[in-house]
Structures are given as C-alpha cells and as structure tokens.
Amino acid sequence: MANIVNNEKPILKVRNLRISFKTNTGTVKAVRGIDFSLYKGRTLAIVGESGSGKSVTSKAILGILANNKIIEDGRIIYDGKDLLTLPENKFTKIRGVKISMIFQDPLSALNPIMKVGKQLTEAMHLENKALVRSAKKGVNNYNSAIARAEGKQAIQAIDALSKDIKDEQEVYKALKENAFDFFQGTANKQNEIYLEALNKAEEAVKAYKEKFLNADATNVDIKEATKALAGLKKPLGACKNFFTQSADDVTDVYVSLMKTYFKQMLTSDKLDAALKEELTKYNVDNFFDLPAKVRAKQREVITPRETYYELIQDITTNLINHFEELKQKYATIDASEVDELIKNYAKLLVTKDSKLSGEAAKARAIELMREVGIPEPEKRFNQYPFEFSGGMRQRIVIAIALSGNPEILICDEPTTALDVTIQAQILELIQKLKVQKNLSIIFITHDLGVVANMADDIAVMYAGKIVEYGSVYDIFYDPRHPYTWALLSSMPDLDTQGKLEAIPGTPPNMLLPPRGDAFAARNNYAIALDYKQEPPFFKVSETHSVKTWLAHADAVDVVPPKTVINRIAKSLKTNPDNTPKYTLKKNSVLEIIKGGKK
C-alpha cells in the first residue's frame, strides 16, 4: 500500500494489525490486516460504516480493548515501542499522557455524580504524583552514585548549593558553576560501569543467539529458547543509562518481545494443525469452503511461524547493533554529557518537591475550559455534567483529553451525538487546537463530509480492511474504490436535489467474512473475480493506493456514479489547484472529466 509522502518519520505506525473477538457463536474478525502511518501535526481520518473496525483500531492504539480480544497479528509502534506488547504498568505512562481519546458520547464519558472540575483535575493530580515518585527515585539514584564516586561530602555540598532554590534554571546554574567536578568524577565512574554492563549484556545476547537462533524456523527449540530468556534479564537490566536515569527502550522490551513472538510461533503451529485437520475432515482445500459453523471458529489468516522467527532474529540482531552504537556514543565522556547530567539532576531536584496544589490544578483546569470555549469557566468548574448542554459536555471531554498535553489525539466520532450546528463548532475547535498544540490526530467517523475540511490523509475502511488510502485531495477528487464512490454518493451537499443514492444491502457478518472482495455483494460494479479472489493494493500515485480489481490494467471500463463525477467536476472548476497527481489512469474519475474516456 502506498504511504503518504512525508520527509518526517511517522509518530505512529500500525502494521498488519489483526484483531478478533471471541464470542459464544465464534470468532468475530474485526480488524483484518491493516497498515497506516500518522505524522506529526497531521490529521488521519479513518472512514467507514459501523462495524468496519474503526473504533476497534483506535481502542487497540490506546490499549483499552475488551478482555475477549484476540490480537492475532501486527504491531503498533509509538516512540520505538510496540504498544501491543507493553505491560499495563508501562502503558499507563502513555495512555492519557502521550495519547488521549475523545469519545463519541460525552454523557457516558463523564461521571454524572462528580463535578466537572474534579474530573478535569483528577488526571492532573495522578500524573503529578507519578512524576514526583519518579523524580525522588531518580535523585536517590544520582546521590548514591555521587556518594560512591566523590564521598558523602559531595552530596552535602550539592544539597547546600541547591537548598531553597525552586527554579530549575537557577539550580542548574548553581550546580554547574560550583559542583561541576563532582558531577564529572561521578560521570566518569558511572560510565565505566555502564560500558562494562553493555559489554556483558552484548556477550550474553550473542551467546543466546548462537545457541538458540541459528537453527531454521522448523527446528528451533521454542521451549528451551523461552526458558533461557530468564538468564538475559539480569545483564539487560543492568544497562540502565545513568545519564538519563531511564531504562534503554530497545533493551528494556527485548525479553517481553521475544516471549510474545515465541508464544505466537507455538500458537501458529496449533492453529495451522487444527485448520489442516478440518480441511481433511471436510475434504476441501480452502478455508472459505469449510462449513460456516467451522469457519466461524477459525482464524481467517494464520501467520506462519517463519514470519515470527524472522522478527525474533531481526530484533536480536538489532539489539546487538544497538549495543555497539551505545558503546561508541559513551566511549568517552566530554563536558556536554556532564552538562546534560547536571540539567537532568536539577530538573529532578525541582520536580520531586513540585506537589501540585489544589489551587494550581484548578487554575490549569479553568485555563483548559477557557481554551475549549466554555463560557464562565470559574462558575462552570463547580457544576455537574447534567448542567451542561451536549456541545458543552463534549468540550469538557476535549479539555480532559488535553489535560495531559498529549502528542496524539484520537477522536472517536466526537460529533455523532451532537446536532449539525454544534458539530461544526466542535470540528472547528479540534482544528484550532491541532494547530495551536501541534497535535497529531486520528479522526474516526462514518461521514466523509465531516472530515472534508480538516483531514490531511484518509483511510477508507470496510469489513475490517483499508480499501483506499490517500491524501484528502486523492479521496475527494480522484476516488477509485466503488465503496468510496458509494460513500460520496450518499453524502448530501448544498446542490443535492431529490433522493440520495443509498448503499444497497448491509455490511457482512464478520463471524464469516466473505471470500474475495468483502464489498462485492453490495457493489454495483462487481466483477466475477471479486467473488473469488481478494484484490491487492494498486498504486494510483505516490500518496494514493486502492484495493479493487477495477484498477487492474485488464479490468472492464466503468463509469462511476454521476453524482460523484458532477460534484468533482464542479469543485475543480472553482478549485483547479486541488487536482491530485496520478499515474494510474484506469477507471479514473478525472480521466472521464478530462474527456479521456467516453
């Protein structure tokens, strides 16, 4: 699938995500292998009907899926970590802090018997307590190291220099000018310990790789390899970076990732054996030829053990390379590293005593309420949710989501429960906050019209899969998938006269996803191949890709709905600069408008 052209690295990557839910009647295949990237300061809209997998995807990113979930495959990469493998105690440092969500129903999202002011400040107090605990631990670790390297008198001197100073910059300045030698001596001593830990960890991982990961995927001893991971915990745990007072991300997650992938290898073997048994029992060759009652309880796609084994080998090789990079980086300690050490120490000293007062939290909450357009926030602070209108309740939910200063904001149909005029106000507010705070936004909706003026990139989802992906100009001015045509045709505009074109039929039962293109049964443009084989992604341009056989060079020529053609033609007359570039001309609306086809 084509990715949106962007010179920056994505802030969030979703790769081959497959999620099912176990029910009494079988396994619901909710998300069926999707890929997308989110970039800093951009809005990605995920559009589709109810049941297409949009909300499941967003909840997976936030780690709030129901307990009957089955993560069949995939990765969600944020800040170098796979969110799907993070334990809950680490996820709490991301959820609501780095990644927040605005839910679609503000009435159910808010506690009806708690004043909105308390709901706003609750997260602030929890976050502050966590920061203070972490800072105290960091200071203690630094002090222990300084005492070992320079003696207790060094700690006493540092305490005297920083005593009663509350400003971080002032503490840093005092320590740099008067205690630089203490920190330099400590840094040199700790760096020797750190380099020794890196060497031991690298040797341990290399020995592990040599013993367990040199066989092919068929012959690897998963049980023994998993058991041996326990021996890596101590050497890897010793690689804690003294300068940042935090565990190294790559090193910290290695053992848990390995356990996850080894477990998935075993699961893959069991599922594959069970599927082969059913295929033999019913004398068929294909999953889709199995009886419905059997197919409902089977996975649609089984990732082979070889895929997981390649991941295991790759992350092990990457870890060894990472050790080499760290050893080069910290081979010698210069004044800049010592300076960073003093800055970090000064920050921790101030943070450990920075208890958030009730007055400060209230002031921050009132500021947030004012930012999201709540009138008289001082008065509203002490009111209950039932005293607010629907639009005002949604503004409170937005304020709560922003209270942790997140990088990513997930908006799960935030305007569904609101009337049209209030919808416009909320959308305008989200767009304004995105610009002010440089937010990256994932916007979930079933209505393409809602995101027309605020999305940068759009992923169209149907039956758990992304069927079209492109920039906002690609999707609105050169749509290629019949489902995208159908969504656009069912969307009213100011010139709409008469009846809108409804999408025939209903979405498929996701206990039994259909063979081939899932939209075929509702598609007026379906061809015989759609019912037999799922189409691949066809590249329309560098920013645009589509999953339909109509994009194949040998496909029949079709004419998209007149509503779509007329709207695009009219819009381009007014805004010709919005015309997207494309290289694939097959069944293009723009080619028809230009007169390239009759």
Image: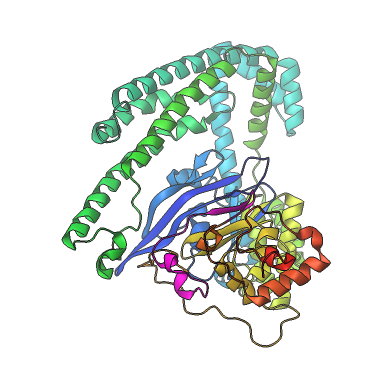
The color scheme shown is rainbow
In terms of depth relative to the viewer, which is nearer, 419 or 116?
419
Residue that extends furthest to the right in the rendered view of this protein: 574
Report x, y in % for residue 63: 48, 53
Query: Which stretch is magenta?
Result: 520-545
Is 539 on the left or on the right of 476, as rendered?
left
Vertical placement of residue 391 versus 155, above or below: below
Vertical placement of residue 525 versus 454, above or below: below
Q: Is residue 388 visible?
A: no
Report x, y in % for residue 486: 58, 73
Report x, y in % for residue 516: 41, 63
Vertical placement of residue 389 versus 514, above or below: below
At x 54%, y 32%, the residue is 137
Report x, y in % for residue 364: 72, 54
The quadrant in which residue 166 appears is: top right
At x 52%, y 63%, the residue is 555
Is 39 on the left or on the right of 465, as rendered?
right
Q: Count the labels in the image.
A: 0
Vertical placement of residue 540 versus 161, above or below: below
Residue that extends furthest to the left in the rendered view of this protein: 281
The quadrant in which residue 534 appears is: bottom left
